[in-house]
């Protein structure tokens, strides 16, 4: 089943996309999620493309912080929201770490996010403290 169909059938109201949603085919050969498809439903797309290996650049950090803001708001308002990146682990785990922290998790709790390399937890803690906690 195509990923966008699962989004629509899952009754999600938002999608936070951390990958390039306009690529012709995903790495697994499946049709990618794209703006045109999502435009037919009542799904709001948040397009936060972060290139592979760019999560800790200024651009990547900005996108992760904004994505975590939207995700935390969705949880607090009970809005069904999907988050996606190409493989569903590295960029997704980074955004989820920041989301969990926004929602009150400790560093240790958020660092246990599936797919988050332990070596990145301290970097994400610094991002949280600099860009989110101080605001």
Image (tube, rainbow, N blue to C red):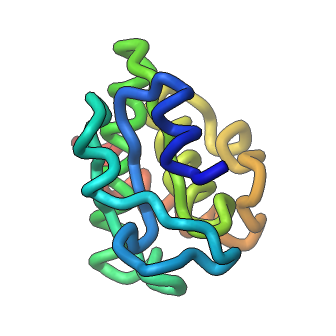
Q: Residue at x 77, y 50 (%)?
A: 114
- Classify residue 115 by image quadrant: bottom right
Quadrant in the picture for the C terminus: top left
Q: Considering only vertical position in the picture, is 76 above or below 116?
A: above
Q: Residue at x 65, y 42 (%)?
A: 110
Q: Considering only vertical position in the picture, is 81 above or below 65?
A: above
Q: What x and y, as percent, mark residue 133?
A: 35, 43
Q: Residue at x 54, y 63 (%)?
A: 85
- Classify residue 48 by image quadrant: bottom left
- Classify residue 10 by image quadrant: top right
Q: Nearer the viewer, residue 7 or 74?
A: 7
Q: Nearer the viewer, residue 128 or 97?
A: 97
Position of 14 compared to 2: left or right?
left
> How many marks can you see?
0
Q: Considering only vertical position in the picture, is 97 above or below 10?
A: below
Q: What x and y, as percent, mark residue 116?
A: 71, 60
Q: What x and y, as percent, mark residue 130?
A: 34, 58
Q: Residue at x 62, y 35 (%)?
A: 106
Q: Nearer the viewer, residue 115 or 38?
A: 38
Q: Considering only vertical position in the picture, is 8 above or below 117?
A: above
Position of 129 compared to 1: left or right?
left
């Amino acid at each position: 089943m195509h990923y966008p169909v699962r989004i629509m059938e899952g009754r999600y109201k938002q999608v936070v996309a951390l990958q390039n949603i306009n690529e012709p085919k995903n790495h697994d050969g499946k049709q990618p999620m794209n703006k045109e498809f999502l435009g037919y439903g009542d799904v709001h797309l948040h397009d936060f493309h972060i290139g592979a290996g760019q999560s800790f650049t200024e651009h990547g950090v900005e996108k992760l912080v904004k994505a975590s803001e939207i995700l935390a708001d969705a949880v607090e308002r009970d809005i069904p929201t999907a988050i996606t990146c190409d493989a569903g682990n590295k960029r997704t785990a980074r955004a989820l770490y920041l989301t969990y922290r926004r929602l009150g998790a400790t560093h240790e709790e958020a660092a246990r996010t599936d797919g988050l390399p332990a070596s990145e937890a301290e970097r994400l803690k610094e991002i949280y403290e600099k860009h989110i906690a101080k605001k």
